[in-house]
Amino acid sequence: MFRNSDKMRYWALILPALAIMVTFYIFPVLGIWEIAFTEPTTGVGNFVQMAESSAVRTSFILTFRVAAITTLGCLILGYVVAYAISNFAGKLTPLMLALVILPFWVSVLIRSFSWIVLLGRSGLVNDTLRDTGLIDSPLRLMHNEFGVLVAMIHVMLPFAILPMLTNMRGISDAYVKAARGLGASEWTAFRQVYFPQTVPGVMSGALLVFVLSLGFYVTPALLGGGRVLMISEYITYQIQEFLNWGLGSALSVALLIATALVLLIAARFVNLRSALLERK
Amino acid sequence: MTDTTDFEAKRDIADIAVERYKQGRLTRRGFVAAMGALGILPALNSKAFAQANEIVVVNWGGTAKDVLQEVLCDTYTELTGIPVVVDGSGPSAGKIRAMVESGAVVWDLCDSGAGSAIILEQQGVTQPIDYSIVDKSKVLEGTAYNNGVGNYVYSYVLATNPKLLGGNVPQNWADVWNTKDFPGMRTFRKSVRGMLESATMAQGVPLAEVYDVLGTDEGIKAGIAKFRELRENIIVWGSGSDSQNLFLQEEVAIGNIWSTRAHLLKDQMDEGSFNVSFNGGVIAPGIWVVPKDNPAGTEEVMKFIAHGQKPELQVKWLEMIGSGPINPEAAPLVPAELAPWNPSSPENLATQILYKDEWYAKNQVSAEEMYVDALIN
Amino acid sequence: MPLSTFRIFFQTGAWLIVAFLVLPLLVVVPVSLTDTSYIGLPKEHLSLQHYVNYFNSPEWLHATWTSIWIGLVVATCASALGTSFAIGCWFLSDKASAIARWVLITPILVPPVVQSLGFYRFWVKLGLIDTSAGVILAHTLLALPYVSISVFAALANLDRNIPRAARSLGASVWQTVLAVIVPAAKPGILTGFVFAFIVSFDEIVGVLFITVRRVTTLPKQIWEGIQDNIDPTIAAVATLLVILTLIVTAIGALRRT
């Protein structure tokens, strides 16, 4: 199909980026595996310590729980928005789309900061509730799992909405119309005809949100009050507080493997290619 | 043996100074004096020194480094003609050892901790303190080591917000664990340092026996269990300013925090909404160490250290930053209104224990792990 | 169309959720106008002191400028490398190039803390810690996936017969790329450039690991502000950034319609 010399030229286009990625990214990330097995002593000591530690186990369970709840929350909320944008043609629909994309451009750091301002003990939410007489003493909205979950759903929501939107845009309304024509109610047509067609989009969104949530650091670190210690924060804790690179690296390896497993399992339900590689 | 030096505490003190300096609360002279007392700059106005080429004092940097370079070193050079370079790169035990072993020593004086000082002495990379120049009686008992000597102190103290508590303020650690009579959130450090001691006292263990009890596995487990019991009421602080924030935002009503941060909070909080008790506090010293073969010579550095012991400098520094004089002679010079805030006043010393680095060297790693588990599980 | 409960449910629900997405971004506005020296609502009157502080603070301005120029360099490097990469892959479209594309998007999947550990250890060896070059290199790597994905997406609609025609008319590979492919990929390259800039401009975890004092980006300054000093200047900065984003989004939306 190609002449060989052409092929060489195409590879010449690919190679600079690929070489940099392999040398300065893949290689250093693999280097973490080496540290995990060699510091402070050679062997699997770090992994033994990790497996025996109930703090590590708790942190992993917590991480998966937070990621799962975040994913679920994002899917439910995201679905409603994606559905409204793709199915109700109105003057305000483009505005809604713009508003969904807007938070995407504001950094996670600032969004987390906003939630600190909102959810604090003397934050906006508590102040308003108190001023209106709804509560007497402030509610605990932050420095716990609740606060982390609210902020994480907020941060991750666009990641769930966009793949679902892409998917819904490709769905012809002919089927729903046909079902309605045959006498199905709006709800029934939605449940039995429309929803099944959107499952691939839902799955893509779920995968994206779940994988990103697993490794999330900024929001839990800022809103968790030190007690919602997800794995990423646990890793930095080991390294910054105790200079314990061996265990920190072993935890990183475990987190990498967990992420890879999630992707492998997801590959059975989701078209990874369209979910990740051909994302728009 | 692990290095138990509390890097965070070191950095924090330097940061407070800079913060105050920026707020204009600390005059330039005050800042210089405070830094001098902190041990970052050994001396001012002193003619006691023979001309050394240059003295390199190493601290834990943070935002302090640039300001130190500009404000402090240049001023000092003006006064004595001796150039002083402050290196803020953090003199960890590992770095000091590597420097001495490589034979290329560029540091003269390092702000370290007792844990590191002991390890470094065992490894033979630091010099003995010359107690004919440095006055052993001018440091708190227990902070004069062969190869290291105290330079200042800070405490882990019981801080409270009487306004949030309705005037009903916990008097001791047992009260802190009593959530029925003292409702509200508490804050503890994201590390067992200075924390496990308070949990042990909360069980009714007398001051003098705290480290004996913690010397056993059961003692540690009992302390950890106390945190597990209290954890729904705990928010954790990571950095000194974190703890300060939690009080300012009224996120917590009670906390075990550094006295240096408490010193800032007493000025920042409204009248009657901040209180500190040194009852059951844990007092921790910073320790000077001098690397072997330091370029400025042994004598110069010893004179530096001796100068930093001067009571008036130490008091000045307490006024400015809130860290305590290591020199007991300084206590009478402390203005009356500041005395209650001085970690090393005789009254406050009587109700506190000295942070025990040996215990941390032996038990910290396993205790930290149990602590995290207790807080999150 | 008649209003059914079904529609009302989705319509109201969607707007409520959009409000949940957007409104929290705006809370930084009142906080930025506080007259207190800590983060909170204005107590007695509105004050611009924290904006004044931002514009008078060498640290904040320097951090802002650092983030902007590093972002621009990163966006340029990543766009050049990523575009070239995506075009090569588009031409080949074989198994090997598909694998290469997977390799290039790994930074999206690897947790930020994990990759930052990797950076840190390797950057120490290379002497890149606390240098702008170190940050640029790290950010370029993190931005590459976004550029290659968006350029590839732009090329998806390009008819493969067009470059073939160009070749059969005697154009070399390079001429074809420059004259035919790059113009077709232009929207994708632009999107990629913007993405790359934003990735670098917002990146925090990597910067926390690979810089110490000499290099401070805006997110790092904000992070330290939240963690260390009690400083409502952060709210002022956040407000400026949110407003800037609003304006840019609005202009983008207006130009499209």
Image: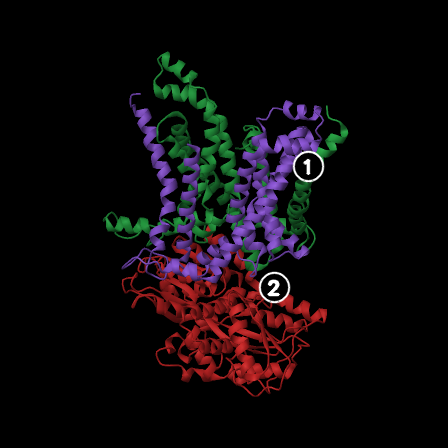
Chain colours: A green, B red, C purple
A178 to B120, vertically: above or below = above
Circle number at residue B2: 2
The chain carrying label 1 is A
**Callout 1: 10 Å neighbours few (<14), some, many (20+)?**
many
What residue is rendered at 62% in x and 41% in y? Answer: C80
**Callout 2: 10 Å neighbours few (<14), some, many (20+)?**
some
The chain carrying label 2 is B
Seen from this angle, which residue lies furthest left? A133
Q: Nearer the viewer, residue B236 or A28?
A: A28
Three-letter amino acid code at the position of disc 2:
Thr
Residue A183 location in percent, x, y? 35, 13
Measured Cα–Cα span from mark 1 to mark 2: 50 Å
Q: Is residue C220 visible?
A: no
Mark 2: secondary structure? loop
C192 to B326, vertically: above or below = above
What residue is rendered at 33% in x and 25% in y? Answer: C7
Three-letter amino acid code at the position of disc 1:
Leu
Q: Which residue is mark 1?
A: A13
Looking at the rendering, which quadrant does residue A92 occupy?
top left
Mark 1 and mark 2 on one chain: no
Q: Nearer the viewer, residue A250 or B264?
A: B264
Residue A144 location in percent, x, y? 41, 49
